[in-house]
Amino acid sequence: MSILVIAEHDNSSLKPATLNTITAAQSIGGDIDLLIAGADCGGAANEATKVSGIGRVLVADNPAYGHRLAENIAPLIAEVGASYSHILAPATTTGKNIIPRVAALLDVQAISDISSVESADTFKRPIYAGNIIATVQSSDSIKVLTVRTTAFDAVSAEGGTASIEALTSIHNSGNSSFIGEELAVSERPELTAARVVISGGRGMASSDNFQLLEKLADKLGGAVGASRAAVDAGFVPNDMQVGQTGKIVAPDLYIAVGISGAIQHLAGMKDSKVIVAINKDEEAPIFQMADYGLVADLFDVVPELNTKL
Amino acid sequence: MKVLVAVKRVVDYNVKVRPTADGSGVDLNNVKMSINPFCEIAVEEAVRLKEKDPATEIVAVSIGPQQAQEQIRTSLALGADRGILIKSDTDLEPLAIAKCLKAICDQESPDLILMGKQSIDGDNNQTGQMLGALTGYPQGTFASELIVEGGKAKVTREVDGGLQTVGLSLPAIVTTDLRLNEPRYASLPNIMKAKKKPLDTTSPEELGIDTTPRVTTLKVEPPPERAAGIKVADVDDLLYKLKNEAKVIS
Ligand SMILES: Cc1cc2nc3c(=O)[nH]c(=O)nc-3n(C[C@H](O)[C@H](O)[C@H](O)COP(=O)(O)OP(=O)(O)OC[C@H]3O[C@@H](n4cnc5c(N)ncnc54)[C@H](O)[C@@H]3O)c2cc1C
Ligand SMILES: Nc1ncnc2c1ncn2[C@@H]1O[C@H](COP(=O)(O)O)[C@@H](O)[C@H]1O
């Protein structure tokens, strides 16, 4: 078995999701190479050589790959990946954008969001907002997979001695261009990797009130998330949405504040170790999922939590 | 401009499905079916483009059983001009769906293809990107804003870190995210009118598509149950339990 893992990075450094994806690759078993496609991505490539479990780091460093445009990167991955038995990427928005395009170029049916490896060709994945876990077997010659990072531990970012190999192949489709981005800057840990997540819903009632949760997050060293309703209402940006169609989180502690617990929200957080729900409606479905439920007005108890912590 | 919209018939988002008793599949008996919410957003976006440029034609395509006509009719009632049903009684995989849509693109030569980012049943999030590979068209996935101007599409995308904007030459594929728009409700007169709009039927065989599955579902099961939780009396009780029982804070 030979496995190509597609690194998630921002050119200067490697994103943690890469480390979880390597663990998934290890549970398939075989030689693992890591592909870094970017522009001026030497920083990320150097970090990658230290990651444990990697044989070679393949680096495609070219302006065409700078913003991870699928039209340019997919043909690169399809070309390099054609000689591997497996191609894996984290199920981040970058992975989800690129991997199906790679699979179709290789005439392969990709498998999205695997949550467990049963064997080299058989995987589990959640469907129907996580209400069903399907065990699926691929008959394609190359298995093309995206990995649910919360379902796999991270390999160590240190201790490896991988070699770097430069790739010279350039794919520039010329039909898409990067115009700009607005990226959130936060001092807090990344939502999908945080040990504690505090999420607010429609019950937060305003953008300003999210400061209550930020304060709590800072006391607990956590990240702040949100329900779709809170994002749609404009309280917080889209990158904070937790759920079936947002981010998947599985922290040690998840605190849902003013969130009712729709199946689409539960899909994104129900694998958390300990779930706390704060809601003034004792019938709210979130309480069926919560280890500790507090029926109360959030505007009374969140400030109290902030004082007592 | 011609816009192709791909709409899928799926279990309604309010339904919590379960495995069948023998674990071989998902129990869909007497379950309410709807248009995939992301596809509804795609139809709405097409209709808004047409409201700006009345020369636009909107073609709604669905691959599915005969009943998927209902979802095409819904799209027609929302403002699509005609429909194409690619009839298949078995569930097709995203790659096969993308191949069917590629065949329709070859016939129709649309300038823009609008699709959902994800079907809420299979949660694949693949078909638009696959169609991109098969046609060679650029893709703007997870769109929260779309501007079509001067033969180009400008797409703002919801990405993990925030928002990214890309420029695509037409023809292009755009997949919708939740914030792109809020779909309208079909009015009764429009529902009546939709019944008279043209709806053609074809099949993967007629289009010459090999739909042999590549992935077999061996088993389906419910997710692990969580042990029932408790209600705590107040903030002090909560903090005590988080510290001493769950040991997740110190
Ligand atoms: C296609 C599709 C995809 C979706 N994807 C997602 C997704 O990824 N993530 C997601 O979250 N949702 C998603 N949804 C939306 C989901 O169905 C729900 O609408 C949403 O999760 C509801 O958000 P909420 O719980 O914040 O709001 P509500 O359901 O309105 O609940 C608000 C809660 O706050 C409580 N509350 C109000 N005031 C207070 C107070 N002062 N103190 C304490 N409690 C208070 C209320 O009792 C209520 O329970 C999706 C829906 C669709 C159709
Ligand atoms: N059977 C289908 N018929 C029409 N469109 C489909 C079908 N399956 C998927 N699509 C389109 O592809 C999008 C993404 O679906 P998926 O890749 O299955 O998550 C959907 O929102 C539709 O726009």
Image: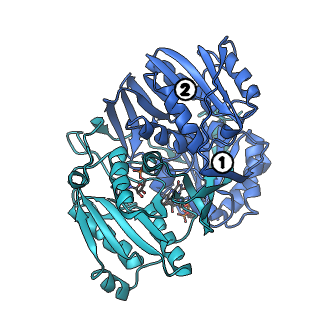
Q: Quadrant of residue A298?
A: bottom right
Q: Position of residue B163 (x, y in %)?
A: 67, 54
Q: Is residue B162 left or right of residue A90?
A: right
- Determine the colour of chain B: cyan
Q: Colour of chain A?
A: blue
Q: Type of residue at label 1?
A: Ile
Closest to the observer, B143 or A254: B143
Residue on which the image places disc 2: A5
Q: Is residue B50 left or right of residue B14?
A: right
Q: Secondary structure at mark 2?
A: strand
Please report the residue visible at 27 percent of the width from the left and 72 percent of the height from the top. B199
Q: Quadrant of the C terminus of chain A?
A: top right
Q: Quadrant of the N terminus of chain A?
A: top left
Give the quadrant of ligand 2. bottom left
Subunit under mark 1: A
Q: Secondary structure at mark 1?
A: strand
User: Crowding at label 2, few (<14), some or many (≥20) Cα neighbours within 10 Å?
Assistant: many
Total numbered labels: 2
Residue that carries the numbered disc 1 in the rendered image: A198
Q: CA distance from mark 1 to mark 2?
A: 31 Å
Is A113 or B100 nearer to us in this picture?
B100
Percent x, y for residue B192?
A: 30, 85
Disc 2 C-beta below 8 A from ligand 2:
no
